[in-house]
């Protein structure tokens, strides 16, 4: 039996090399927590940077958005619709405002914690932070996205 | 509240979310907020949330579907204020 948390990760519209969610550890209508381990083999380390591998901020943002906004959005939509419809999910990032405080090196595991500010008229806005294994804040801010189930598959 | 009073309060909210290539002079009561004023769907939600705070009303999903122009917004706000 798949758990609720596993089925949310499976419903994500991403795959390698652009899936940045390993597992969810908590979800409610107000909050989600999950984690991801950046393998030293990730494709972007080859170019960022030339001489030293550091995880790009855009990738940290993507990881925060996938766990913090898209996973939470799938959960919230599944509360409103029948679960089968989640495969017609449409997602768009609408805005981000993030401060970056610490670097993430290859092999590190990060935890993302996201709290809903609101989910109205398909727009989900969240306060999101990313923590390292020492529980230090790597980056934090707000992310919003539009999430809806497309209805044109009748 | 009169139509003019509502319009005067609505105008600065809509201005905030206009894209850079649309001038505030382009705003008229008949203009389509997304189609003509180019406000994207995420910002249209922001407009509605600001309107809710400003007028102390609450929009339902059906109101959102009926919201196309400045005039639609004024009609919806009027209707909400009258039923309070």
Image: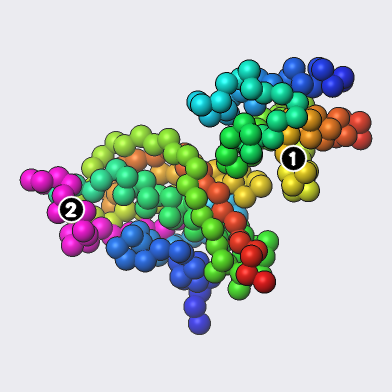
Q: Is residue A41 magenta?
A: yes
Question: Which residue corresponds to the image point at 50% horizontal and 82% vertical from the top-left?
Answer: A1
Q: Position of residue A65 (x, y in %)?
A: 43, 50
Q: Nearer the viewer, mark 1 or mark 2?
A: 1
Q: Is residue A40 visible?
A: yes
- Image: B28 above or below A136: above
Give me the chain letter of mark 1: B
| Residue A135 place in picture, x, y as percent | 32, 47
Using residue B26 as the reference point, say whether residue B81 is left or right of it: right
Residue reaching furthest left?
Answer: A51
Measuring from the top left, give residue B75's x and y in whole percent. 84, 32
Query: Please, is residue A66 above or below residue B40 in the view?
Result: below
Q: Relative to B2, does residue A17 appear above or below in the rendering?
A: below
User: Residue B55, labelled with which disc?
Assistant: none
Instruction: Give the CA distance from mark 1 to mark 2.
Output: 46 Å
Q: Residue furthest right?
A: B83
Q: Pick the residue in front: A128 or A46.
A: A46
Tell me the residue that label 1 is attached to: B67
Residue A114 visible: no
Q: Is residue A39 magenta?
A: yes
* Above-or-below relation of A86 to A46: below
Instruction: Report the quarter where the C terminus of chain A lies.
Output: bottom right
Residue denoted by label 2: A45
Discs 1 and 2 lie in a common subunit: no
> Which range of residues does the magenta coloring cover?
A33-52
Instruction: Return the chain for callout 2.
Output: A
Q: Residues within 10 Å of mark 2 (few under 14, many from 20)?
A: some
Q: Residue at x 23, y 42 (%)?
A: A103
């Amino acid at each position: 039996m798949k758990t609720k948390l596993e089925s949310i990760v499976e419903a994500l519209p991403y795959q390698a090399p652009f899936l940045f969610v390993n597992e969810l550890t908590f979800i409610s209508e107000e909050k989600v927590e999950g984690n991801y381990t950046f393998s030293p083999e990730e494709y972007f380390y080859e170019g960022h940077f030339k001489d030293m591998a550091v995880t790009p901020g855009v990738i940290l943002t993507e990881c925060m958005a996938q766990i913090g906004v898209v996973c939470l959005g799938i959960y919230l939509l599944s509360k409103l619709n029948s679960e089968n419809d989640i495969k017609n999910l449409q997602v768009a990032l609408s805005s981000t405002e993030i401060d970056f405080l610490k670097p993430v090196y290859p092999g590190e595991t990060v935890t993302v914690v996201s709290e809903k500010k609101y989910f109205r008229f398909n727009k989900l806005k969240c306060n999101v932070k990313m923590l390292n294994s020492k529980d230090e804040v790597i980056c934090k801010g707000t992310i919003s996205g539009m999430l809806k189930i497309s209805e044109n598959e009748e | 509240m009169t139509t003019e009073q509502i319009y005067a309060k609505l105008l600065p909210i809509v201005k905030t979310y206009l894209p850079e290539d649309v001038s505030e002079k382009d705003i008229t009561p008949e203009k389509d907020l997304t189609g003509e004023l180019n406000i994207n769907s995420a910002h249209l939600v922001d407009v509605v949330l600001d309107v809710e705070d400003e007028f102390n009303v609450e929009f339902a999903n059906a109101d959102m579907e009926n919201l196309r122009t400045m005039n639609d917004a004024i009609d919806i706000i009027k209707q909400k204020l009258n039923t309070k």
